């Protein structure tokens, strides 16, 4: 059983065959697929899967807090199954490749007190940008 499926079961979320295929499509490190990529990969395993089922399932997973929905720079939304691990992202400005980044220090500590403007900071989201090795060579 996949880690995501296990996490979803904790919410007493009914795991239908369609939902299982979608959840298993999201398994792995550095997974940041668009809904269309998820549909394509899931349909390879279950051809009768509908676009509406994929979108509805993703919306439910996001609402449960088990999948992150990332909307960056006007590109298609990406879905990140690593919602249970605090992390940030590294994005290629050329091709849009996205990788998870795990920092060694708490980024909230990087924010000087006078720059917090009275906020009590609970979490942070940092995006590092650049060119991946493939785009550097292009």
Image: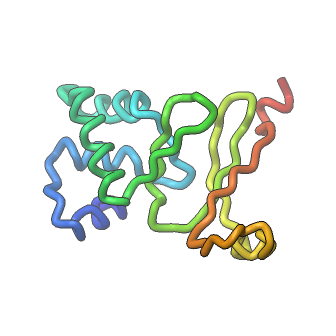
For the C terminus, give its image quadrant.
top right
Left or right relative to 35: residue 57: left
Residue 36 is situated, as x and y percent measured from the top left of the image, at 40, 28
The residue at the point 56 percent across, 72 percent down is: 122
The residue at the point 77 percent across, 32 percent down is: 134
Give the vertical position of 72 relative to 104 (above or below): above
Left or right relative to 56: residue 128: right
Residue 118's quadrant in the figure?
Answer: bottom right
Give the vertical position of 33 relative to 125 (above or below): above
Give the vertical position of 105 relative to 78 (above or below): below
Residue 63 is situated, as x and y percent measured from the top left of the image, at 31, 53
Between residue 132 and residue 130, name the one nearer to us: 130
Between residue 135 and residue 68, name the one nearer to us: 68
Give the colour scheme shown.
rainbow
Give the vertical position of 65 relative to 16 (above or below): below
Residue 32 is situated, as x and y percent measured from the top left of the image, at 52, 43
Between residue 113 and residue 55, name the one nearer to us: 113
Label tally: 0
């Amino acid at each position: 059983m996949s880690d995501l499926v296990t996490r979803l079961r904790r919410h007493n979320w009914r795991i239908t065959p369609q939902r299982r295929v979608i959840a298993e499509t999201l398994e792995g490190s550095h997974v940041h697929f668009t809904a269309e990529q998820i549909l394509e990969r899931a349909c390879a395993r279950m051809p009768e899967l509908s676009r509406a089922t994929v979108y509805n399932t993703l919306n439910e997973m996001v609402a449960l807090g088990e999948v992150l929905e990332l909307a960056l720079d006007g590109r298609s939304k990406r879905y990140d199954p690593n919602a249970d691990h605090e992390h940030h992202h590294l994005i290629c400005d050329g091709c849009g490749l996205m990788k998870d980044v795990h920092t060694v220090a708490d980024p909230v500590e990087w924010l000087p007190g006078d720059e917090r403007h009275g906020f009590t900071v609970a979490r942070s989201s940092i995006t590092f940008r650049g060119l991946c090795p493939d785009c550097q060579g292009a």
